[in-house]
Image: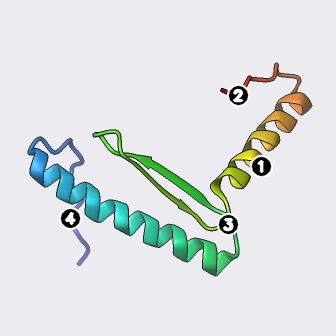
Amino acid sequence: MGRRKLQLQRIEDKSRCQVTFSKRRSGLIKKARELSVLCDVDLALIIFSSRGRLYEFCSADSLAGILERYQSRIAEEAVASGAPKAEAT
């Protein structure tokens, strides 16, 4: 017998919402770490909380390095497809 499908909806209780966010954030970071180790991939995870706090995980030496690789890949794909290059801020 499987689990019942839960209806996803915003948690209105601020305290309960913060506890859920903290637990799920930890689980997401754990899964990201596992994926990077098991599959030998470079991975970056960036999370902004509802309070504006930044949480990040990077499997490589630097988050900036992964972001630079991402931006250059996007630029290459834009050139290949003929789309105008978006400017980085």
Taking the image as shown, residue 82 lies to the left or right of residue 48, namely right
**Dots 3, 2 in contact, CB < 8 A:** no
Q: Earlier in the sequence, mark 1 or mark 4?
A: 4
Mark 4 lies on a secondary structure that is loop
Query: Which numbered disc covers residue 4?
Result: 4
Closer mark to the observer between disc 4 and disc 3: 3
Q: Are marks 4 and 2 in contact (CB under 8 Å)?
A: no
Q: Which residue is mark 3?
A: 60
Amino acid under label 4? Answer: Arg
Left or right side of 61 for 16: left
Q: Quadrant of the N terminus?
A: bottom left
Asked if 23 appears above or below 85 in the picture, the reply is below
Question: Which of marks 2 and 4 precedes in the sequence?
Answer: 4
> Residue sitting at 33 percent across and 45 percent down?
49
Q: State how far apart marks 3 and 2 are (Cα).
A: 22 Å
The residue sitting at 82% across, 22% down in the picture is 83
For residue 69, the mark is: 1
How busy is the neighbourhood of tag 1: few (under 14 within 10 Å), some, or many (20 plus)? Answer: few
Q: Could you tell me residue 81's position as x and y percent? A: 87, 29
Locate residue 22: give its quadrant. bottom left
Tag 1, which secondary structure? helix
Q: Which residue is mark 2?
A: 88
Disc 4 to disc 3, C-alpha distance = 38 Å
